[in-house]
Amino acid sequence: MKACLIHCRLMRAVAVGMDPDEAANKNARGQLVGYGCEAHESKVRARGERMAEKRKHKAAAKEEFKRRKTSV
């Protein structure tokens, strides 16, 4: 999926008038976020949200473990 998303972002950036070389350079640095098609961008957002939720739960579990360890 990642290669398809990169290609999608590059093609849409060029389609809106960006120079192909400039678009390729920005794409290599990850600066074309949001230029992909809605389906790809929504997948990226959803994955980011899932990962954020996982980090939140992991931090909460770590705090709960510390709390239990100190109360015993």
Image (cartoon, rainbow, N blue to C red):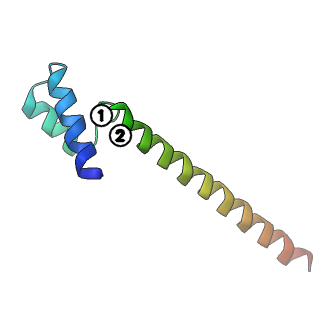
Q: Residue at x 13, y 38 (%)?
A: 24
Of all residues shown, which one is farthest toward the bottom? 72
Residue drawn at 31 percent across, 32 percent down: 37
In depth, the one of 30 and 49 nearer the eye is 49
Is 33 displayed left or right of 46 in the figure? left
Q: Amino acid at mark 2?
A: His
Q: Secondary structure at mark 1?
A: loop
- In percent of width and height, residue 21 lies at 7, 34
- Which residue does the image show at 24% across and 35% down from the upper left? 9
Asked which quadrant contains residue 38, the reply is top left
- Using residue 39 as the reference point, say whether residue 69 is left or right of it: right
- The residue lying furthest to the right in this view is 72
Position of the C terminus, as image quadrant, is: bottom right
Circle 1 residue: 36
**Residue 16: x %, y % from top left:** 19, 19
Above or below, 4 against 64 in this view is above
Under mark 1, the amino acid is Gly
Q: CA distance from mark 1 to mark 2?
A: 6 Å
Q: Residues within 10 Å of mark 2 (few under 14, many from 20)?
A: some
Q: Quadrant of residue 33?
A: top left
Q: Which residue is mark 2?
A: 40
- Seen at 15% across and 33% down, the residue is 23
Contact check, label 1 and label 2, Cβ < 8 Å: yes
Residue that protrudes farthest toward the top in the picture: 17
- The reply to whether residue 29 is in sight is no
